[in-house]
């Protein structure tokens, strides 16, 4: 699996993912730091990446567009540094890998993870 780390998360996450055998790139290495979320989503889909973010807008984009790709992992916590969340994020990815590869929105916080398969239905 390949991950695109959003600007609102530390580039340190790249090392975390790589240590667990996954490819990762921080958006600052491949795109304009001021790019829109839609631009980031398009780049991730075209490059086969899963977006890893702290931004709620990505879920809204998935819902609004009925997109099937890319998968998105949203972390929901005040402390989003790897030292705090690595264990729960890696566990969620390991548990939900088949769904992430097929297309999913995964929300991870300190206590649990939730998943919705893409495309998201509007309610």
Image: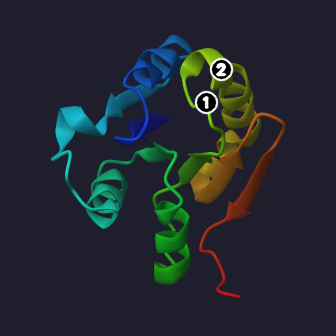
Tag 2: Cα neighbours inside 10 Å, few (<14), some, or many (≥20)? few
- Check if mark 1's residue and mark 2's residue have beta carbons within 8 Å: yes
Q: Quadrant of the C terminus?
A: bottom right
User: What number of labels is visible?
Assistant: 2
Query: Which residue extends farthest top?
Result: 19
- What is the quadrant of residue 20 in the picture? top right
Residue tagged 1: 79
Query: Which residue extends farthest right?
Result: 111
Q: In the picture shown, does residue 34 fall above or below 79?
A: below
Direction from residue 29 to residue 3 in the image, left or right: right
Residue tagged 2: 84
Marks 1/2: CA–CA distance? 7 Å
Residue 33 x, y percent position in the rendering: 20, 45
Residue 102 x, y percent position in the rendering: 60, 56
Question: Toward the viewer: 112 or 101?
Answer: 112
Determine whether the residue tagged by mark 1 lies in a helix, strand or loop.
loop
């Amino acid at each position: 699996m390949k991950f695109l780390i959003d600007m609102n998360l530390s580039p340190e996450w790249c090392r975390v993912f790589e240590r667990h055998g996954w490819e990762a790139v921080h958006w600052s290495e491949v795109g304009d730091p001021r790019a829109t979320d839609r631009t980031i989503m398009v780049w991730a889909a075209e490059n086969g990446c899963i977006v890893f973010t702290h931004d709620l807008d990505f879920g809204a984009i998935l819902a609004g567009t009925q997109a099937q790709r890319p998968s998105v992992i949203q972390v929901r916590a005040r402390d989003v540094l790897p030292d705090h969340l690595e264990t729960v994020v890696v566990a969620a990815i390991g548990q939900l890998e088949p769904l992430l590869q097929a297309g999913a929105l995964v929300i991870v916080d300190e206590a649990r993870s939730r998943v919705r398969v893409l495309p998201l239905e509007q309610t």
